[in-house]
Amino acid sequence: MEAGLSIDPGRLQRLDGFLGSVTPTLALQLARAVEIDRLRGGALPHDAILTALRPRLRDAARRLDRTLTPRRLVCSVFEDLLVDSRLRKQRGRVLRTSIEPVWQWLTRVLAPVACEQALDAIRDKLLKGGPDFADAEVDMFQRVAAEAILRAIPTADMNDSRAAEAVRVLGPSMAADAHDMARMMEMAAEVRQLQRMLGKPMQTLSEEDIFRIRGVFERVAVSHPDCASYIPFLVLGRLEKPWEAIRLTGALSRKVNDTLISQTDFGAIGEALLSDLDDCVERLSQVRPADLNAEMVVREVVDFSNISTGIVRELGIKRDGIWGRHMMRVRGDMSAQMERLLARAPKEISVTLPTVRRGGFGIRATRRAPDLTRTLDPVKAAKAVQLARVIAGSRQHAMAGAFAGMLKQVDEQVTATVRQYVDDLSDEVHAMGQEGAAASIKFVDHAAALIGALDGEAAGDMVRRRANAALVISPPIADVA
């Protein structure tokens, strides 16, 4: 096993503080030195140092420069299945944080002696020749690991009585992750061939790619029939447009619609993508309107739009199909969540743009004009800008989320209110004069932020320039980004 010195809590805290402040480049150099020391059996507190370095390593421009360790080589076979977070376990999706507990369970409980021997062989090859010469030794460890895990977790069904001990130790979700890892390690040689054959990320899935993937798949279907259905998940993890994996499942299963594909092992890919849509909606359901984060909301809307549109385009899903019915339901859920977040947007934005009635003659009699003497609530103003950003960011994606009609109505009301306020703003700034400059600046900035969110930054900059020109003071009002 990989050993190292223990370290007391006080020193560990100081170590975290120091290593957490180093540059990404230095973090890579330190990590490389620590991992080489571990390969040589050194006595440094390897895990403590690498844990402290991890935040800086994430910032490193080229994380692949880190020295390859035995564990990293072993786990590379299922790296395309790894995800950083999820709301529920999905077959073919392995939580990155599951690696450490499964590794400890495997190497300390399931097969400690065999794993240690295999790891020693990998370390020896790494020190003598580098990772390109360790394939056979890595394969040996992966065979040992796959056999040990599959004896403990023989199926993907965590209710299987044979998996009871694994579920007790790891929990059902992590035990299912361990099963997925084992299936990938069981066909490690074929996976490694496919990984080297395909780029990462794959900008698109070509017919040539599908032909080559099918060749590997057909060999795996003969040699490891229980593993073959994981091939599309490997490809899914490499695609920039994950919905293109639907096209691959159709080619491999030789089925032409969602109902037929869903009845095969390849239906898990479609279920995973539909589950991604469910996750988008669920994450939005957890957003409190008072804590609205426009970047997060728009990201979920865009992801939902891209995945749902991509699935339909790839397979031509019909409303009465299994996946079609799921799609209709989840689009309705998305519409409901967006209405919950945006229905009050016109009122919440207009309340931050106070107006006062002005007398006059002709068409300008008793008009509403910006009231720059009022107090601007910074919390409400910030919320209004967030709402404006959600509206603008959702425009191109509302149709796929089934909330286009609602968004159009909200957008028209908000845009009309903000544009009218901006049109009248310069006159009021001019009327306030130099004495009122300090009071008017907050409304100029707020109006610029709103119109910038709705119509682009250039429109916001124009609001500030017009206000500066209207005030005619020196120095002018400073631009605020």
Image: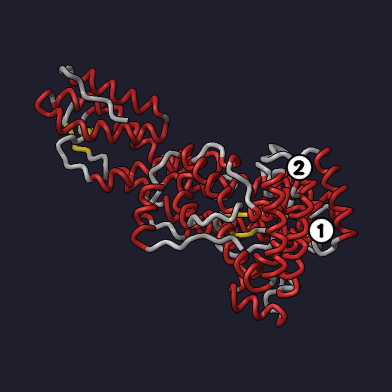
**Residue 269 falls in which quadrant of the image?**
bottom right
Q: Please report the residue visible at 78 percent of the width from the left and 61 percent of the height from the top.
A: 186
Q: Please report the residue visible at 17 percent of the width from the left and 22 percent of the height from the top.
A: 430
- Which of the two labelled residues, at mark 1 and mark 2, occupies the earlier sequence position? 2
Nearer-the-camera pick, 476 or 400 = 476
Q: Please report the residue visible at 57 percent of the width from the left and 62 percent of the height from the top.
A: 100
Q: Position of residue 396 (x, y in %)?
A: 55, 39
The figure's colour scheme reads secondary structure
Contact? badges 1 and 2 (CB < 8 Å): no
Q: Where residue 196 is drawn, which disc sits there?
A: 2
Left or right side of 305 for 445? left
Q: Quadrant of the N terminus?
A: bottom right
Left or right side of 200 for 18? left
**Residue tagged 1:** 228
Other residues around mark 1 within 10 Å, as few (<14) / some (14–19) / many (≥20): many
> Looking at the image, can residue 113 be seen?
yes
Amino acid type at mark 1: Ala
The secondary element bearing badge 1 is classed as: helix
Q: Position of residue 339 (x, y in %)?
A: 46, 53
**Residue 397 falls in which quadrant of the image?**
top right
